[in-house]
Image (cartoon, coloured by chain):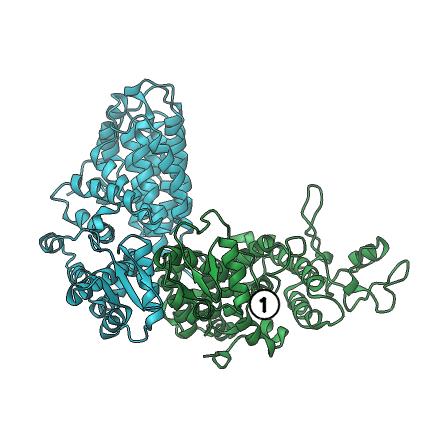
């Protein structure tokens, strides 16, 4: 048994192209579509056959597509990537020539997604001694940028025909590459291009969610937690409830950001999305249990590092200090807390080499940031806290 | 792509300076004092000393080819040149350190240029870049107190970053060699020993920079040796503004790292002064300057007084009166100064050993 014959396939493609049905062409140009798996589509030299059925410029695209399928059937990922890269470049040229129309954007989305996925595959298969990691993905990003430029430059067409509507999908593909090869600084001009685009609301919801997710993560790395909160919250709330995997990914970043801003995630949410690792951490921070906190950081170290949230988790320790000192304040029931009492608490919770001066330093930081209201008297070794609201709620800062 | 390797040429110049350049510079009075035959310095036309003259840095320009075989030094000669500069020249007692610095900096730049034009192997690149990086790092501290006209810290730092980043990229590229158990490459041992030191240098140099910290968190565990862990620890505490701990651990670093760390001290002190101005703010309470001297590694109370004046902090005898309204928020940090605890560490060290020998654990001061 085989899938439909190749000649039949070519006829469908031609009809779809002529009637400007971008979505249909996209389906049949996808490496992830069913036809890609059938041996009768794995043709080494498809030129003669294709040219008999298809006019220019479609023939060129389909020839490259079939060649790519052949390379894949030989498990030649590097070769397949090269062909897909040529295909993307050919398509970019065609796209540029299509003035005042944007029906072919779905084809672009499909080709570009396949290109990135292939580049990732090629990276994996090509990790030889003499290769530079990330090189292929970087080349793929250049190719995507070519498409992006064509879309971004299309400012003459009417709103319903503009190719600029395709920018966001490309930006998202580029984000995925840049995050993978750790070149976050390259995201900045892309973000600016999207922010200044007048079509913000016309982009599809799915694309917007992906976009917000990456920009939120970038903001987190730049220590702009307010923006990170805003973007990641949008992504989380709008992400469809059936996409549990995506919601989980968003939460991995949203939870630490929220905690740093003074919010406490509920256990049920963490459980529901399988990020229960955070629950113990939440408790340690809330209780000011530095010992548990240090242990958890050690246990989950590789998970935190892999996700790139290790540093933000480290910063949560400051919140844990505040909560611990608040406890001491409540126990002693005095507005003049001896520094020694705080030090004792720190030492008791495993911060064994902390002395009075360092304790004062930790308190000084909290006062400086407004997390404790009061002042330190070094002479008396006392922290004198405000009679009213000495530990303002953390959420009141931002 | 495959044949690109053959496009790079290999030099044939067997001396530190090509003969042609030597003649030209002798004729045009372009010899550095360290390149003249001793005794001829005062002559109308000083003579070039073939044993001491080193190829100088030449900017690439249109119409000028830098890729002439006879003008390029092969890797072994480059290595010899670097050793000459960082051993013989640096130990020269007849000229000042700034004269030596300017000479060495320029000549190292031409070494880097020759490296790049010939695209020399990774092993050689590592051998050359390591001492070069150490030289820039050491100079950054050694000359930190100088006026901008004598020493440009910005330019020096630029060279330092360029070389160090290049070095780290090469380390990353050789990473996989370490995963092949049967791989025998004589340089692996050398990398194993020296790489942690440069990873640590990268963290300490970029204190407060989260990108640098994220790098070290992601490198393979085999590189997280004691010195890297200590440096990471300092950087994490810097991130949390625990400056008391930062200063304490800074003192325990090996000499070169401590010297680079000390370059952050004026910033650390400024930041902590600002924090203290808020947290210790009081109309009648004071903070003893003696304690502060210990905490922030000041050499003397004189230095504290200078800093306090600079930031608008009031002094009362031997005590500091912090006031959140008097701290001058717009002030820039004070000019870097030499730090006594670094001087102590460096005092009994031979400079060329510091720059050329891969450091070992026995150099730790605790």
- B328 relative to B59 in the view: left or right: left
Disc 1 secondary structure class: helix
Query: The residue marked by circle 1 belongs to what chain?
Result: B
The residue furthest front is: B284
Residue B122: x and y in percent read 53, 63
Residue A276: x and y in percent read 14, 59
Q: Chain B's colour?
A: green
For the point 8% across and 54% down, which residue is it? A268
Q: Is residue A386 visible?
A: yes
- B307 relative to A168 in the view: left or right: right
Q: Chain A's colour?
A: cyan
Q: Is residue B223 visible?
A: no
- B89 relative to A304 in the view: left or right: right
The residue furthest right is: B44
Compared with A11, A238 (above or below) is below
For the point 21% across and 34% down, which residue is it? A205
For the point 26% across and 47% down, which residue is it? A397
Q: Viewer-proximal residue, B82 or B96?
A: B96
Residue assigned mark 1: B131
- A202 relative to A186 in the view: left or right: left
Figure quadrant of residue A324: bottom left
Q: Viewer-proximal residue, A220 or B264?
A: B264
Residue A23: x and y in percent read 23, 30
Q: Viewer-proximal residue, B9 or A101?
A: A101
């Amino acid at each position: 048994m085989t899938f439909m014959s190749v000649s039949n396939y070519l006829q469908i493609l031609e009809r779809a192209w002529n009637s400007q049905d971008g979505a249909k062409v996209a389906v049949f140009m996808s490496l992830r579509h069913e036809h890609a798996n059938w041996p009768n589509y794995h043709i080494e030299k498809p030129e003669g056959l294709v040219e008999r059925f298809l006019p220019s410029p479609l023939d060129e695209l389909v020839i490259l597509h079939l060649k790519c399928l052949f390379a894949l059937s030989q498990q030649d990922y590097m070769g397949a990537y090269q062909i897909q890269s040529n295909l993307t470049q050919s398509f970019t040229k065609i796209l540029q020539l299509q003035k005042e129309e944007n029906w072919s954007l779905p084809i672009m989305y499909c080709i570009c997604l396949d290109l990135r996925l292939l580049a990732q595959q090629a990276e994996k298969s090509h990790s030889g001694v003499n290769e530079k990691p990330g090189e292929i993905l970087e080349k793929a990003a250049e190719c995507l940028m070519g498409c992006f430029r064509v879309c971004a430059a299309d400012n003459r067409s009417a709103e319903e025909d503009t190719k600029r509507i395709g920018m966001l999908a490309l930006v998202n593909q580029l984000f995925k590459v840049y995050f993978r090869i750790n070149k976050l600084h390259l995201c900045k001009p892309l973000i600016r291009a999207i922010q200044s685009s007048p079509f913000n609301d016309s982009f599809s919801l799915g694309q917007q969610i992906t976009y917000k997710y990456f920009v939120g993560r970038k903001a987190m790395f730049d220590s702009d937690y307010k923006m990170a909160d805003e973007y990641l919250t949008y992504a989380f709330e709008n992400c469809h409830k059936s996409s549990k995997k995506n919601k989980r990914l968003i939460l991995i970043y949203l939870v630490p950001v929220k905690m740093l801003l003074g919010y406490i995630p509920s256990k049920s949410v963490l459980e529901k999305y399988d990020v229960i690792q955070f629950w113990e951490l939440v408790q340690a921070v809330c209780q000011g249990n530095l010992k548990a906190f240090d242990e958890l950081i050690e246990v989950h170290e590789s998970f935190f590092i892999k996700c790139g949230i290790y540093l933000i988790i480290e910063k949560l320790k400051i919140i844990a200090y505040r909560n611990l000192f608040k406890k001491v304040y409540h126990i002693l029931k005095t507005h003049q807390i001896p520094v020694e009492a705080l030090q004792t608490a720190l030492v008791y919770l495993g911060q064994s080499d902390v002395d009075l001066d360092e304790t004062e330093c930790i308190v000084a930081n909290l006062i400086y940031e407004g997390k404790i209201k009061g002042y330190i008297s070094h002479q008396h070794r006392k922290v004198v806290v405000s009679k009213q609201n000495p530990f303002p709620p953390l959420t009141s800062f931002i | 792509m495959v044949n690109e390797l053959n496009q790079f040429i290999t030099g044939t110049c067997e001396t530190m300076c090509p003969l042609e350049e030597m003649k030209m510079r002798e004729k045009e009075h372009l010899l550095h004092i360290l390149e003249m035959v001793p005794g001829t310095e005062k002559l109308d036309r000083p003579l070039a000393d073939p044993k001491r003259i080193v190829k100088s840095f030449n900017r690439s320009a249109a119409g000028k080819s830098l890729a002439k075989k006879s003008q390029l030094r092969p890797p072994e000669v480059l290595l010899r040149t670097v050793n000459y500069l960082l051993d013989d020249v640096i130990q020269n007692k007849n000229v000042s350190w700034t004269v030596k610095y300017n000479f060495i900096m320029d000549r190292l730049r031409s070494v880097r240029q020759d490296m790049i034009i010939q695209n020399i192997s990774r092993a050689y690149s590592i051998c050359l870049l390591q001492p070069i990086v150490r030289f820039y790092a050491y100079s950054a501290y050694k000359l930190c107190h100088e006026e901008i006209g004598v020493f440009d810290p910005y330019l020096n730092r630029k060279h330092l970053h360029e070389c160090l980043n290049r070095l780290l990229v090469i380390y990353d590229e050789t990473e996989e060699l370490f995963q092949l158990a049967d791989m025998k490459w004589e340089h692996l041992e050398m990398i194993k020993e020296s790489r942690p030191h440069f990873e640590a240098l990268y963290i300490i140099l970029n204190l407060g920079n989260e990108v640098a910290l994220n790098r070290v968190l992601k490198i393979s565990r085999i590189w997280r040796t004691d010195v890297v862990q200590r440096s990471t620890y300092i950087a994490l505490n810097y991130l949390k503004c625990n400056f008391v701990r930062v200063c304490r651990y800074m003192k325990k670093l090996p000499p070169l790292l401590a010297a680079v760390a000390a370059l952050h001290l004026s910033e650390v002190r400024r930041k902590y002064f600002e924090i203290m101005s808020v947290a210790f703010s009081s109309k009648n309470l004071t903070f003893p300057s003696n304690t502060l001297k210990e905490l922030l590694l000041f050499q003397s109370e004189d230095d504290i007084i200078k800093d306090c004046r600079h930031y608008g902090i009031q002094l009362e005898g031997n005590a500091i009166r912090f006031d959140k309204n008097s701290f001058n928020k717009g002030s820039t940090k004070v000019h870097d100064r030499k730090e006594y605890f670094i001087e102590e560490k460096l005092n009994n060290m031979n400079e060329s050993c510091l720059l050329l020998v891969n450091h070992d654990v026995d150099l730790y001061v605790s």
